[in-house]
Amino acid sequence: MGDPLAALDAVAAQHMSALAALGAAAADGIAVDLIPGNHDSELADPDLQERLRALVADAAGTSASLLRPTFRVRPWFLLVPGLLYAEHGSQYHALNAVADPLSPFGRWSRRLPPGAVLDLFFRRAEHRGRARALPRVVPAMLRALARRGRTGAATVASLHTFAPEAGLSPDALAGLRGLAEDSWVALLRNACAAALGRAGHVESRQQQAALAVHQILAQEAQPAPVYVFGHTHRVAHRALDANSARLLWFNGGAWADGSYGFVEVEGRADGVVARLCHWDPAARSTLTLSDPLLAQPSVAQEGAPTTRGARSAGNRSADAVATP
């Protein structure tokens, strides 16, 4: 069914300059946090994390042990209380949501979500090796579909194990996991949106999830005013109103198409400022795509970090999506 370590080595060989840059930043003390999504969930595996860290260290001419404190893979999400919550975003796309975001399913797994199996089916000419797995993958996927929306004992156990690292209670993690679009209703809703040509459906689900995530984090006394997602490959931002707090939702787009969008987040005394940016590789400079946006903290958020910066890539409402 394929060797994930060999696949990782093959991908790394094509992006050595990027790995070298990440390694140099981590070696200089800059925290580099990678958040896997539906295309690279294998990175939730500790063995692959160690291999990736070694590849990054080799590319940067340093040691993996030196990078261990600063180069990390964050399964599922990254939370910096008072500043930001970041997640890949595929959990809010019914075709790609999985039951256990902490368990790697892999590109040859029999637990592939529907979107990955459809991708294999329609792109068999490009992925002949993977396509040969379809006769085994499809029946397993159908069995997984029959269990959509259920939380198994293994998932419950993984949430309890992950709780100390996440800094949240198992109940809070269960609440976050429950926001995933992994039900038959979500699949039907996604199909209807596609049939009607409704653009921005997944972004809308991400924004609704951001409001729900904020409520869960507030109950844990660890709210964040900025929510950063990806997955859709479309750069956008939106202001969200969560009772007394003004939140900001961002989608940094994707670098695969050469757009090189990213989000800058900065904690200040008057709130958290975030902006969409674009890296111009030819000019080797950063262009700002949006004016600085201020997320005003609620009472629970006061005392948030005022110097911490990051780059990533009830009565609640949301403004219209704004795209640069």
Image (spheres, rainbow, N blue to C red):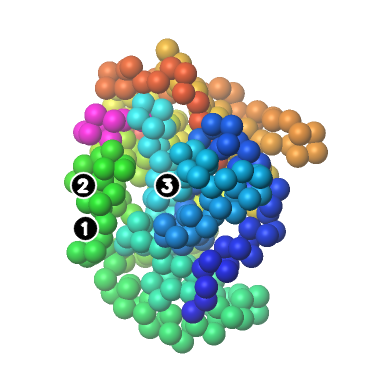
From this view, report whether residue 123 is shown above or below residue 316. below
The three-letter amino acid code for the residue at tag 2 is: Pro
Badge 2 vs badge 3, beta-carbon distance below 8 Å: no
The three-letter amino acid code for the residue at tag 3 is: Arg
x and y, in percent, of residue 53 in the image: 53, 50
Badge 1 vs badge 3, beta-carbon distance below 8 Å: no
Of the pair 45 and 35, the residue shown nearer to us: 45
Q: How far apart are labels 2 and 3 at the CA level?
A: 17 Å
From this view, report whether residue 175 is shown above or below residue 183. above
Q: Which residue is mark 3?
A: 74
Question: In terms of sequence position, does the residue under pointer 1 or pointer 3 come before the other?
Answer: 3
Instruction: Tell me if residue 174 can be seen.
Output: no
Question: In terms of sequence position, does the residue under pointer 2 or pointer 1 come before the other?
Answer: 1
Q: How far apart are labels 1 and 3 at the CA level?
A: 19 Å
Badge 2 vs badge 1, beta-carbon distance below 8 Å: yes
Q: Which residue is mark 2?
A: 170
Residue 156 is marked as 1
> Dot 2, how many residues are within 10 Å of its Cα: few (below 14), some (14-19), or many (20+)?
some
> Dot 3, how many residues are within 10 Å of its Cα: few (below 14), some (14-19), or many (20+)?
many
The three-letter amino acid code for the residue at tag 1 is: Val
- The span shown in magenta is 217-224
Instruction: Tell me if residue 108 can be seen.
Output: yes
Could you tell me which secondary element the residue under label 1 belongs to? helix
Please tell me which residue is depicted at 25% across the width and 52% down the height of the picture. Answer: 161
| Residue 301 image-quadrant placement | top left
Instruction: Answer left or right for 138 relative to 173.
Output: right
Please tell me which residue is depicted at 65% across the width and 79% down the height of the picture. Answer: 125
Residue lying at the far right in this picture: please name it: 282
Please tell me which residue is depicted at 49% across the width and 82% down the height of the picture. Answer: 134
Predominant SS along the magenta part? loop
